[in-house]
Image (cartoon, rainbow, N blue to C red):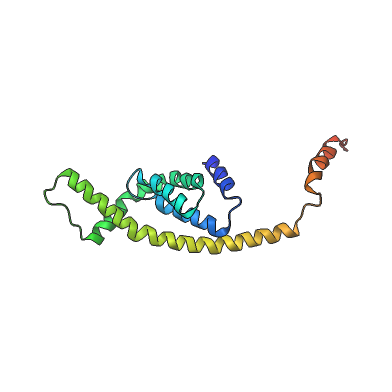
Amino acid sequence: MKNWVVRLQSYLADLSAEQIALLLSVGLVLGVFPIMGFPTVFCLLAAFGLRLNFPALQLLNNASSPLQIALLLPLARAGKSLCGGALPIGGSWMGTLGAAAVHAVAGWACICIPMGALLYVSLVGFLRTTMRRDSETAMTHRNPYPACAVPLVAELKTASPQRN
């Protein structure tokens, strides 16, 4: 998991607060889509349509796979209550499975998409204040050495004799 976090941080390094918030909210919402295999296709389409970083979006999709499995039954139950609990006529197991998939997608659309919009708005506000505070801190704590002198200073520190 630590490797995934490091990769995600490298993907997000040069993005604005709005881009990071959009990437995280779209990745999590699409990653919990209740039919296996579809989140990957949806992430690919979202990456091209919204001009998002596809590797980062796919990483979020993979990281949210346990959440996708955990939300499968609750989303199907929510969708069943939204759709009135109608089951297909005939009662075959394929019809029941299809109805459960439709119910899960309905539950996902009614719950996860609004939550994703709320997540986006919350993350934009949070990331703007965090990035502003970090940039102000960076301006007050500047490195006294220019970038080209940093290796030279490190070399001088290691070359000087140690005093006890």
Residue drawn at x 50%, y 51% is 52
Q: Is residue 136 left or right of residue 39?
A: right
Q: Residue furthest left?
A: 90
Q: Is residue 50 left or right of residue 138?
A: left
List x then y, in percent, for residue 84. 20, 61
In the figure, 80 relative to 36: above or below? below
List x then y, in percent, for residue 21. 51, 57
In the figure, 85 relative to 42: above or below? below
**Count of picture labels:** 0
List x then y, in percent, for residue 39. 38, 47
Q: Which quarter of the picture shows residue 82?
A: bottom left
Residue drawn at x 39%, y 46% is 41
Residue drawn at x 71%, y 57% is 138
List x then y, in percent, for residue 79. 27, 57
Residue drawn at x 58%, y 54% is 15
Q: Is residue 53 left or right of residue 67?
A: right
